[in-house]
Image (tube, rainbow, N blue to C red):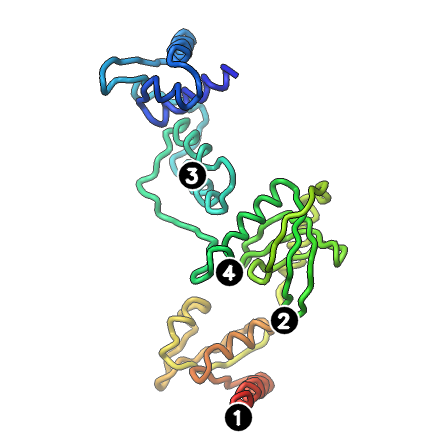
Amino acid sequence: MKIDRLLEILILLMHRKNIQAKELASYFGVSTRTIYRDVETLSVAGLPVEMTRGRTGGISLMQGFTLSRIPVTAKEKDVLQLALQNLSTTKFPEVETLMQKFQALWDATTERDWIVIDPAEYGAPPERNEIFAVMKECILENRQLTFTYYSSNREETRREVAPLKLWYRGSAWYLWGYCYLRQDYRLFHVHRMLDLEILDYFQPIYEEATFIKFREHAVTPAPKIAVHLRFDPSVYYRLMAIFPAEILVSLSGSIELKTEIPKTDWLYSFLLSFGADMEVISPDNLRTEIKQQLQMALNLYE
Protein backbone atom coordinates (compact mmCIF):
# COMPACT_ATOMS: atom_id res chain seq x y z
CA MET A 1 0.00 0.00 0.00
CA LYS A 2 1.14 3.54 -0.74
CA ILE A 3 0.71 4.73 2.84
CA ASP A 4 3.00 1.93 4.06
CA ARG A 5 5.61 2.87 1.47
CA LEU A 6 5.45 6.52 2.45
CA LEU A 7 5.97 5.70 6.11
CA GLU A 8 8.88 3.39 5.36
CA ILE A 9 10.49 5.99 3.10
CA LEU A 10 10.25 8.49 5.93
CA ILE A 11 11.81 6.05 8.41
CA LEU A 12 14.59 5.13 5.98
CA LEU A 13 15.39 8.81 5.45
CA MET A 14 15.51 9.41 9.19
CA HIS A 15 17.93 6.53 9.58
CA ARG A 16 20.08 6.91 6.45
CA LYS A 17 19.92 10.72 6.12
CA ASN A 18 20.48 10.66 2.33
CA ILE A 19 19.29 8.09 -0.25
CA GLN A 20 19.21 8.16 -4.03
CA ALA A 21 15.86 7.77 -5.77
CA LYS A 22 17.00 4.75 -7.79
CA GLU A 23 18.00 2.97 -4.58
CA LEU A 24 14.53 3.53 -3.09
CA ALA A 25 12.93 2.42 -6.36
CA SER A 26 14.92 -0.81 -6.30
CA TYR A 27 14.10 -1.38 -2.62
CA PHE A 28 10.34 -1.02 -3.11
CA GLY A 29 10.18 -2.52 -6.59
CA VAL A 30 8.70 0.61 -8.20
CA SER A 31 9.88 3.19 -10.73
CA THR A 32 11.94 6.26 -9.85
CA ARG A 33 9.02 8.36 -11.07
CA THR A 34 6.85 6.74 -8.38
CA ILE A 35 9.47 7.61 -5.78
CA TYR A 36 9.50 11.25 -6.92
CA ARG A 37 5.70 11.34 -6.58
CA ASP A 38 6.00 9.86 -3.07
CA VAL A 39 8.52 12.55 -2.13
CA GLU A 40 6.16 15.20 -3.42
CA THR A 41 3.34 13.70 -1.34
CA LEU A 42 5.51 13.84 1.77
CA SER A 43 6.43 17.46 1.06
CA VAL A 44 2.77 18.46 0.58
CA ALA A 45 2.03 16.81 3.92
CA GLY A 46 4.44 19.27 5.55
CA LEU A 47 7.44 17.00 6.01
CA PRO A 48 10.82 18.68 5.30
CA VAL A 49 11.95 16.38 2.47
CA GLU A 50 14.69 17.76 0.19
CA MET A 51 16.08 16.59 -3.17
CA THR A 52 19.51 17.56 -4.47
CA ARG A 53 21.01 16.84 -7.87
CA GLY A 54 24.43 15.50 -8.74
CA ARG A 55 26.46 12.36 -8.10
CA THR A 56 26.42 12.88 -4.33
CA GLY A 57 22.87 14.15 -4.27
CA GLY A 58 19.70 12.35 -3.37
CA ILE A 59 16.66 12.55 -1.12
CA SER A 60 17.07 13.67 2.48
CA LEU A 61 15.29 15.17 5.46
CA MET A 62 16.08 18.51 7.03
CA GLN A 63 18.84 17.97 9.60
CA GLY A 64 17.59 17.41 13.12
CA PHE A 65 14.09 16.30 12.11
CA THR A 66 12.54 13.47 14.22
CA LEU A 67 9.05 12.23 14.99
CA SER A 68 9.69 12.06 18.71
CA ARG A 69 6.71 13.18 20.77
CA ILE A 70 7.19 10.75 23.65
CA PRO A 71 8.91 12.03 26.82
CA VAL A 72 11.58 9.32 27.08
CA THR A 73 14.92 10.07 28.71
CA ALA A 74 18.27 9.22 27.16
CA LYS A 75 18.82 6.44 29.72
CA GLU A 76 15.39 4.95 28.93
CA LYS A 77 16.22 4.98 25.22
CA ASP A 78 19.46 3.11 25.95
CA VAL A 79 17.56 0.50 27.98
CA LEU A 80 15.07 -0.07 25.16
CA GLN A 81 17.82 -0.32 22.57
CA LEU A 82 19.77 -2.77 24.73
CA ALA A 83 16.65 -4.93 25.09
CA LEU A 84 16.28 -5.05 21.30
CA GLN A 85 19.96 -5.93 20.89
CA ASN A 86 19.60 -8.80 23.35
CA LEU A 87 16.46 -10.01 21.57
CA SER A 88 18.36 -10.10 18.29
CA THR A 89 20.62 -12.84 19.71
CA THR A 90 17.66 -15.25 19.56
CA LYS A 91 17.27 -14.50 15.80
CA PHE A 92 13.80 -13.07 16.48
CA PRO A 93 12.22 -11.96 13.19
CA GLU A 94 12.32 -8.30 12.13
CA VAL A 95 14.38 -7.15 15.12
CA GLU A 96 16.93 -5.44 12.85
CA THR A 97 14.18 -3.51 11.06
CA LEU A 98 12.60 -2.59 14.37
CA MET A 99 15.95 -1.35 15.69
CA GLN A 100 16.37 0.87 12.62
CA LYS A 101 12.92 2.35 13.14
CA PHE A 102 13.60 2.88 16.83
CA GLN A 103 16.89 4.66 16.12
CA ALA A 104 15.28 6.84 13.48
CA LEU A 105 12.18 7.82 15.45
CA TRP A 106 14.07 8.75 18.60
CA ASP A 107 17.46 9.48 17.08
CA ALA A 108 18.61 6.77 19.47
CA THR A 109 22.29 5.98 19.20
CA THR A 110 24.69 4.65 21.79
CA GLU A 111 28.37 5.45 22.04
CA ARG A 112 29.29 1.84 21.30
CA ASP A 113 27.88 -1.68 21.29
CA TRP A 114 29.04 -2.65 24.78
CA ILE A 115 27.29 -5.97 25.41
CA VAL A 116 27.00 -9.20 23.42
CA ILE A 117 24.81 -12.18 24.36
CA ASP A 118 25.25 -15.37 22.34
CA PRO A 119 23.30 -18.57 23.11
CA ALA A 120 25.80 -20.67 21.13
CA GLU A 121 27.91 -23.13 23.12
CA TYR A 122 31.69 -22.98 22.82
CA GLY A 123 33.12 -26.00 21.06
CA ALA A 124 29.73 -27.33 19.99
CA PRO A 125 29.23 -28.40 16.36
CA PRO A 126 27.19 -25.86 14.32
CA GLU A 127 24.18 -28.18 14.05
CA ARG A 128 23.89 -28.30 17.84
CA ASN A 129 23.51 -24.54 18.10
CA GLU A 130 21.00 -24.54 15.24
CA ILE A 131 18.41 -26.00 17.60
CA PHE A 132 17.68 -22.46 18.77
CA ALA A 133 16.44 -21.57 15.29
CA VAL A 134 14.28 -24.72 15.24
CA MET A 135 12.75 -23.94 18.64
CA LYS A 136 12.10 -20.32 17.69
CA GLU A 137 10.25 -21.41 14.56
CA CYS A 138 8.11 -23.90 16.49
CA ILE A 139 7.25 -21.45 19.27
CA LEU A 140 6.33 -18.55 16.97
CA GLU A 141 4.45 -20.66 14.43
CA ASN A 142 2.75 -23.02 16.92
CA ARG A 143 4.38 -26.17 15.55
CA GLN A 144 4.77 -29.35 17.58
CA LEU A 145 8.29 -30.55 18.21
CA THR A 146 9.55 -34.10 18.75
CA PHE A 147 12.98 -35.00 20.11
CA THR A 148 14.93 -37.57 22.10
CA TYR A 149 15.41 -36.38 25.66
CA TYR A 150 17.83 -37.47 28.38
CA SER A 151 16.59 -36.63 31.89
CA SER A 152 18.80 -35.93 34.89
CA ASN A 153 18.24 -39.51 36.10
CA ARG A 154 19.60 -40.87 32.78
CA GLU A 155 16.22 -41.86 31.36
CA GLU A 156 16.00 -41.74 27.56
CA THR A 157 12.56 -41.01 26.07
CA ARG A 158 11.09 -39.74 22.82
CA ARG A 159 8.96 -36.67 23.49
CA GLU A 160 6.33 -34.79 21.53
CA VAL A 161 5.90 -31.27 22.85
CA ALA A 162 3.88 -28.14 22.16
CA PRO A 163 6.77 -25.65 22.70
CA LEU A 164 5.70 -22.40 24.35
CA LYS A 165 8.73 -20.57 25.74
CA LEU A 166 12.52 -20.56 25.59
CA TRP A 167 13.73 -19.86 29.12
CA TYR A 168 17.24 -18.86 30.19
CA ARG A 169 17.55 -19.83 33.84
CA GLY A 170 20.70 -19.73 35.94
CA SER A 171 23.40 -20.55 33.38
CA ALA A 172 21.43 -22.81 31.02
CA TRP A 173 18.73 -22.68 28.35
CA TYR A 174 15.44 -24.56 28.79
CA LEU A 175 12.43 -25.21 26.60
CA TRP A 176 9.07 -24.99 28.37
CA GLY A 177 5.99 -26.55 26.85
CA TYR A 178 3.20 -29.09 27.07
CA CYS A 179 4.51 -32.68 26.96
CA TYR A 180 2.04 -35.13 25.40
CA LEU A 181 3.88 -38.11 26.93
CA ARG A 182 3.53 -36.81 30.51
CA GLN A 183 0.22 -35.01 29.82
CA ASP A 184 1.47 -31.93 31.62
CA TYR A 185 3.74 -28.89 31.29
CA ARG A 186 7.43 -29.73 31.45
CA LEU A 187 10.83 -28.02 31.33
CA PHE A 188 13.52 -29.47 29.07
CA HIS A 189 17.25 -28.74 29.25
CA VAL A 190 18.10 -27.64 25.70
CA HIS A 191 21.45 -29.43 25.52
CA ARG A 192 19.87 -32.74 26.51
CA MET A 193 17.56 -32.63 23.48
CA LEU A 194 18.64 -34.56 20.37
CA ASP A 195 17.23 -35.43 16.93
CA LEU A 196 14.71 -32.59 16.74
CA GLU A 197 11.90 -32.82 14.18
CA ILE A 198 9.19 -30.25 13.44
CA LEU A 199 5.65 -31.66 13.38
CA ASP A 200 2.14 -30.33 12.73
CA TYR A 201 0.47 -27.12 13.85
CA PHE A 202 -1.06 -27.04 17.35
CA GLN A 203 -3.69 -24.78 18.83
CA PRO A 204 -2.20 -22.59 21.61
CA ILE A 205 -3.31 -24.23 24.84
CA TYR A 206 -2.17 -22.12 27.75
CA GLU A 207 -2.49 -18.76 29.46
CA GLU A 208 0.43 -16.72 30.77
CA ALA A 209 -0.78 -17.38 34.33
CA THR A 210 0.05 -21.07 33.75
CA PHE A 211 3.68 -20.27 33.10
CA ILE A 212 3.87 -17.88 36.06
CA LYS A 213 2.55 -20.62 38.36
CA PHE A 214 4.96 -23.16 36.88
CA ARG A 215 7.86 -20.76 37.26
CA GLU A 216 7.08 -20.07 40.91
CA HIS A 217 7.13 -23.79 41.61
CA ALA A 218 10.25 -24.41 39.52
CA VAL A 219 12.35 -21.83 41.37
CA THR A 220 11.41 -23.10 44.84
CA PRO A 221 14.82 -23.34 46.55
CA ALA A 222 16.11 -26.76 47.59
CA PRO A 223 17.02 -27.38 51.25
CA LYS A 224 20.48 -26.10 52.09
CA ILE A 225 23.24 -27.68 54.14
CA ALA A 226 26.12 -25.97 55.93
CA VAL A 227 29.47 -27.00 54.44
CA HIS A 228 33.12 -26.41 55.22
CA LEU A 229 35.31 -26.93 52.17
CA ARG A 230 39.04 -26.63 51.54
CA PHE A 231 40.40 -25.83 48.07
CA ASP A 232 43.79 -25.56 46.45
CA PRO A 233 44.61 -21.92 45.56
CA SER A 234 44.94 -22.88 41.88
CA VAL A 235 41.12 -23.13 41.56
CA TYR A 236 40.42 -19.71 43.07
CA TYR A 237 39.28 -18.35 39.68
CA ARG A 238 36.52 -21.00 39.53
CA LEU A 239 35.30 -20.22 43.02
CA MET A 240 35.10 -16.49 42.27
CA ALA A 241 32.52 -17.20 39.56
CA ILE A 242 30.17 -18.79 42.12
CA PHE A 243 30.86 -17.45 45.62
CA PRO A 244 31.38 -13.92 47.01
CA ALA A 245 35.06 -13.12 47.41
CA GLU A 246 34.59 -12.14 51.05
CA ILE A 247 33.79 -15.73 52.12
CA LEU A 248 36.82 -17.22 50.35
CA VAL A 249 39.43 -17.17 53.10
CA SER A 250 43.12 -17.84 52.38
CA LEU A 251 44.55 -19.92 55.20
CA SER A 252 47.84 -21.87 55.43
CA GLY A 253 48.29 -22.31 51.70
CA SER A 254 44.68 -23.20 50.95
CA ILE A 255 41.30 -21.56 50.50
CA GLU A 256 38.68 -22.23 53.17
CA LEU A 257 34.99 -21.84 52.39
CA LYS A 258 32.17 -21.97 54.92
CA THR A 259 28.70 -21.43 53.52
CA GLU A 260 25.28 -22.99 52.88
CA ILE A 261 24.68 -24.80 49.58
CA PRO A 262 21.49 -26.42 48.21
CA LYS A 263 21.78 -30.21 48.49
CA THR A 264 21.05 -31.23 44.92
CA ASP A 265 22.71 -33.40 42.26
CA TRP A 266 24.58 -30.27 41.21
CA LEU A 267 26.41 -30.17 44.57
CA TYR A 268 28.00 -33.58 44.06
CA SER A 269 29.00 -32.97 40.45
CA PHE A 270 30.36 -29.55 41.42
CA LEU A 271 32.51 -30.89 44.26
CA LEU A 272 33.76 -33.91 42.31
CA SER A 273 34.76 -31.68 39.38
CA PHE A 274 37.64 -30.31 41.49
CA GLY A 275 39.26 -33.73 41.93
CA ALA A 276 42.26 -33.56 44.24
CA ASP A 277 41.98 -29.77 44.53
CA MET A 278 39.06 -29.98 46.98
CA GLU A 279 38.44 -31.57 50.38
CA VAL A 280 35.16 -31.71 52.31
CA ILE A 281 35.87 -30.89 55.96
CA SER A 282 32.25 -31.06 57.10
CA PRO A 283 29.57 -32.29 57.37
CA ASP A 284 30.75 -35.86 57.91
CA ASN A 285 27.98 -37.47 55.86
CA LEU A 286 28.83 -35.35 52.81
CA ARG A 287 32.53 -36.15 53.27
CA THR A 288 31.67 -39.87 53.32
CA GLU A 289 29.45 -39.62 50.23
CA ILE A 290 32.13 -37.80 48.22
CA LYS A 291 34.71 -40.38 49.32
CA GLN A 292 32.43 -43.19 48.13
CA GLN A 293 31.90 -41.49 44.77
CA LEU A 294 35.65 -41.07 44.30
CA GLN A 295 36.27 -44.70 45.25
CA MET A 296 33.70 -45.90 42.72
CA ALA A 297 35.44 -43.85 40.04
CA LEU A 298 38.83 -45.26 41.09
CA ASN A 299 37.49 -48.82 40.84
CA LEU A 300 36.88 -48.27 37.13
CA TYR A 301 40.64 -48.05 36.59
CA GLU A 302 41.66 -51.14 38.60
The residue drawn where x is 38% and y is 49% is: 115
Q: Amino acid at mark 2?
A: Pro
- Asked if residue 273 lies left or right of residue 177, the reply is left
Q: Amino acid at mark 4?
A: Ser
Q: Position of residue 275 (x, y in %)?
A: 46, 82
What whole-number distance in Å separates the C-alpha atoms at marks 2 and 4? Answer: 20 Å
- Sequence order check, earlier mark of 2 and 1: 2
Mark 1 neighbour class, 10 Å CA radius: few under 14, some 14 to 19, many 20 or more: few
Residue that carries the numbered disc 4 in the rendered image: 171
Q: Quadrant of residue 23?
A: top left
- Sequence order check, earlier mark of 1 and 4: 4
Q: Work out whether residue 105 can be spotted.
A: yes
Residue that carries the numbered disc 1 in the rendered image: 302
Whether residues under marks 2 and 4 lie with C-beta atoms below 8 angstroms apart, the answer is no
Residue that carries the numbered disc 2 in the rendered image: 223
Which sits in the foreground, 182 or 35? 35
What whole-number distance in Å separates the C-alpha atoms at marks 1 and 3? Answer: 58 Å
What whole-number distance in Å separates the C-alpha atoms at marks 3 and 4? Answer: 24 Å
